[in-house]
Amino acid sequence: MDSLELMASGAWHNGFATEIGNALGRASRLCFSLNSISPENKSERESIIRDLFGEIGDRFIINSPFRCDIGYNIHVGDNLICNFNVAILDEAEVWIGDNVFIGPNTSICTITHALDFRQRNEGMMRSAPVTIGSNVWIGAGVTVLPGVTIGDGSVIGAGSLVTKDIPSGVLALGSPCRVVREITEADVVVDIRCPD
């Protein structure tokens, strides 16, 4: 196994390995290019995002600045909205469903470093995938930790630290993030007024 395969496997590995450094450098250059382009230049931004990500569906908005570590480990469905200053540390796979809203200053992390400082200083780390279901809203300033799954239709409140799996169809918030209640028909807004 090379270092990229070790990284993807979830095994402890040397994060300072050359192949990993090259992958980080590629993503860094693409993120720099993306963040340097005017939001009005939609076709060039889309081209960079499609080159950066492993896959992404139709209809997406990714506001700058955006940052990721590897890029090709990110897999996204249709209709993603990423607000400003979202970071995805995708040393492991990150799976994001359809119709997902991600608030500003959110971090999605798949990587953890060794607790022992000697091993940490030598680059010892491991990764675990993150899965975010469809129709999920992640509020502003949320941090999602390695190995977490967030179920379909759930809402994560602003400022939450998501350390464990969150089931489908719930409102969850806090540090650590905990389920507050189910989202029900009572949450449907009935008095909507939009200009023509």
Image: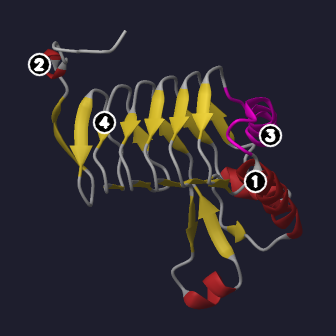
Q: CA distance from mark 4 to mark 2?
A: 15 Å
Q: Amino acid at mark 3?
A: Ile
Comparing 15 with 107, the one in front is 107
Q: CA distance from mark 2 to mark 1?
A: 43 Å
Q: Callout 4: 10 Å neighbours few (<14), some, many (20+)? A: many
Q: CA distance from mark 1 to mark 3?
A: 11 Å
Q: CA distance from mark 4 to mark 1?
A: 31 Å
Q: Is residue 161 above or below residue 113?
A: above
Residue extending furthest bottom? 118
Of the numbered discs 2 and 1, the one sitting upstream in the chain is: 1
Name the residue carrying label 4.
155
* Pointer 2 with pointer 1, Cβ within 8 A: no
For mark 2, give the secondary structure.
helix
Q: Callout 3: 10 Å neighbours few (<14), some, many (20+)? A: some
Of the numbered discs 4 and 1, the one sitting upstream in the chain is: 1
Name the residue carrying label 1.
36
Q: Position of residue 64 (x, y in %)?
A: 62, 49
For mark 3, give the secondary structure.
helix
Q: Amino acid at mark 1?
A: Ser
Q: Nearer the viewer, mark 4 or mark 3?
A: 3
Task: Tell me: 183 left or right of 139.
Answer: left
Q: Is residue 38 above or below residue 154?
A: below
Q: Residue 54 colored magenta? A: yes
Name the residue carrying label 3.
48
Of the numbered discs 4 and 3, the one sitting upstream in the chain is: 3
